[in-house]
Image: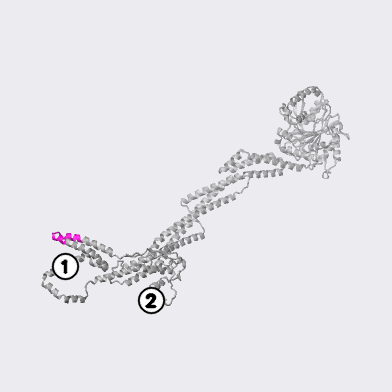
Amino acid sequence: MEPMGLQGSLTFGLEGILAKEIETLIKPKISSTDDLRTIDNYVILKNHGEGTSIIKEVGDSLPQGVAHDNQDMENSCSTQIIDGDGVFNVSGMENFLKAVKFGECGLSYAVVSIMGPQSSGKSTLLNHLFHTKFREMDAFRGRSQTTKGIWIARCVDIEPCTIVLDLEGSDGRERGEDDTAFEKQSALFALAVSDIVLINIWCHDIGREHAANKPLLKTVFQVMMRLFSPRKTTLLFVIRDKTKTPLENLEPILREDIQKIWDSVRKPHEHKDTPLSEFFNVEVVALSSYEEKEEQFKEQVANLRQRFFHSIAPGGLAGDRRGVVPASGFSFSAQQIWNVIKENKDLDLPAHKVMVATVRCEEIANEKISSFSNKEEWRHLEEAVQNGIVPGFGKKLSSMLDDCLTEYDMEAIYFDDGVRTSKRKQLESKLLQLVHPAYQSMLGHLRSKTMEDFRATFEKALERGEGFAAAVHHCTQSLVSKFDEGCKDAAIAQAHWNCSKVRDKVWRDIDAHVASVRAAKLSELTSFYEEKLKKALAEPLEALLDAPSDDTWSAIRRLLVRETRTTVSEFDSSLSAFDIDQATVDQLLAKLKQYAKNIVESKAKEEAGRVLIRMKDRFSNLFSHDSDSMPRMWTGKEDIRAITKSARLASLKLLSVMAAIRLDDEKDSIESTLSHAFMDTSYSSANRSIQLVDPLVSSSWNDVPANRTLITPVQCKSLWRQFNAETEHIVAQAIATQEANKRNSNWLPPPWAIVAMVILGFNEFMTLLRNPFYVGVLFVAFLLGNALWVQLNVSGELQRGALPGLLSLSTKFLPTIMNILKKLAELGEGQRPNTREARRVPELEADISMNRVESSSISSIASSEVTSSETGVEHTSPEKHTE
């Protein structure tokens, strides 16, 4: 580096004192031997114009406890990014870029680097040109290497943001003659990352064949060939310590030398004929000697500084640059470029640009996902949607997603379009995956709310009397429309999610609920009409089956058809409101018709179980009452045999009617079979010799299906046997009563006895005529006998039978005699005749009523129990009782 001049020599003593003070301040705060190296990073730099010195950190961060006191130093923030051993200072680079807020620049920044021979005044030029604070060589201590590795700093007060790289000088004795590896690596690094490269050369070397700038230029051009698609870089040749030779004469010579070097460099085949201008913009500027003409040097540097303002604008020093890496990816790009250079690989800048864009865009995307996940607004929204419907969910979430994507676009706008777009899609996809559960929860709440509203609305519509189908259509359309509106409200603008699956689930839920309600309503309606049909059929059926006759089943069929037609018609009209298919309607109507038949069959089976009681009741009624329904008086004139047969035929008719169900108006032979078997004695006796098998010894009728059989033939035979056994005593009692009546009605002696009495009693009769006293005695005896006859009710008692009558008369004879004597005594005392009559009448009535009770036929009820395993009908009657 150049000597610092007279002013530098005057301040050297002061700087030495300050350096010792700095060392005194720093050493107590250093905790390790590694930190001792940082002492070299603190130098005393002269503040031109004021003659004061400031402390500047030009390496890594100060040890803890050492502060920065100068604003320019803070603005410059010079940092070593690559040390002398080629190690990249990642943390230092990151800290530097954060300190100067480089990431906010986007593409609006410029990178300037400087290269040249060692101790050629590169750092001095940068400090004056960009107001940086790079360490400069102390000429009083000798000429030696000052800058090791590569340093970076921000150019103060230059727009756009410009950073400058101070490279280690070439051709230094410290590295030796053969150690040019780092020189080439740093040159390639500068060409790969810089927009403008300052090449510091001495004026007296221009025109020389073996000048110091020749190896440098050759190195620059050689490493340039390792870039597959090199960026267009501005090479600004700074001629130092300009002599009296005008620049107009120096520049052509320099350009000619540059062209010769370019032509002599070995190039790849594809760049064999590529001109220098394709890779470089060559600019030349000359500066006076800093030591001899300091003021003129400063003035020229100030003029040169103006050219760096708006350097990336069209027409600027780097106006036609290519392949710019966005500022936020500069650190990573520089790291990767240096790693590739260190591994001695060819540097593919386009691929590197894509790689940097990929890594940085992915980092930005991850940052945005993390930021979105931790966003308070998103957390509140996610928590709210777990608990219920959130109005404006889609708009709120779309806005948050849009803000997140916009932030990504802002930060990744300068990276490769393809990579940026691809990573944006990935970011959008990951964000949508993050919010998808919340969206699904929202749809789930909408689905649940829709079903709740549908149930309530549908129930109210049915309660208002609205038709089932109309209520279903109205409620479904209304609620599904609300669901669709809710889905639109929940829709996220960035997502093209289709809610049709959830909508289909809502439809299925509605259909399932409607089907459930329809089934319940149809069941309720069916039960209503079944009950109505049962009431319409039950009582008439009981009445018809209670007194079966020839037209009983025809009457039942007419009743069944009439009531079934009426009820089915009403049921069909009610079903029209449910909007169900005709097949289902036909099925329900057929079910109701079958139910009507089942009622008839059930009633018929029930009555068939009581057929024996019905038969006995009918027999007793017909046998004990005449055609006018008056009780029969067995006076002896009645034909008991004919009456018995007629009553039995009526009972047999009842049995034949109840033996089978006849709803199809088909003729059968049950009645004729039973009549021939039980009543036609001539047929029975004639067929006994012909038929070996009794037709009633069977479990089924020949022309009646088993499902329509109520009483099987064998059951009929058993029932008839029980019926005859239990009704015989009624017939026997009637015969006995008739015989008693006949005897009572013939109380006079036979005519021959009367003739004999007249002939034999003639003398006694004449005696009575001759003596009237005997006539009086006989008259009194007649009166007494008549009174006893009436009081004892002799004729009534004898109608009960001779023996029972005599027993009853014997018990009543003495009380009756005493009663008559008492009455005669009362008459003798002069009592009124009506008193005697009043007492006699009640007693006579009491006697008559008691006689009637005792004379009523002692009824006997027989019981039988016939069970058929085939028909399941039971016939029961109480056990016999005799009195």
Secondary element under disc 2, as helix, strand or loop, is helix
> Is 196 left or right of 389, judged from the image as shown?
right
If you read the primary sequence from the N terminus, does the residue marked by circle 2 or circle 1 appear first? 2
Circle 1 sits on which residue? 781
506 drawn magenta: no
* Residue linked to disc 2: 682
Please tell me whether residue 827 belongs to the stretch shown in magenta: yes
Disc tally is 2
**Secondary structure character of the magenta stretch overall:** helix
Residue 226, position as x, y percentages in the image: 81, 41
Q: Is residue 682 visible?
A: yes
Q: How is the image coloured?
A: one colour
Vertical comparison of 184 with 452: above or below: above
Query: Mark 1: which amino acid?
Result: Ala
Residue 787 in the image: x percent, y percent? 19, 65
Tell me if mark 2 has few (under 14), some (14-19) or many (20+) residues whose alpha carbon lies within 10 angstroms of its own.
Answer: few
Q: Is residue 244 above or below residue 367?
A: above
Tell which of 159 and 700 is nearer to you.
700
Question: Can you tell which quarter of the image residue 276 is in?
Answer: top right
Which x, y percent locates residue 539?
39, 61
The image shows residue 621, relative to residue 308, as above or below, that is below
**Element on which disc 1 rests:** helix
2 or 1: mark nearer the eye: 1
- Along the viewing direction, whichever of 654 and 740 lies nearer the viewer: 740
Horizontal and vertical percent position of residue 495 = 63, 46
In the image, what residue type sits under mark 2? Ser
Q: Quadrant of residue 798?
A: bottom left
**Quarter assignment of residue 692:** bottom left
- Please identify the quadrant where the C terminus is shown: bottom left
Stretch in magenta: 823-840
User: How many C-alpha atoms fall within 10 Å of the one at disc 1: few (<14), some, or many (≥20)?
Assistant: few
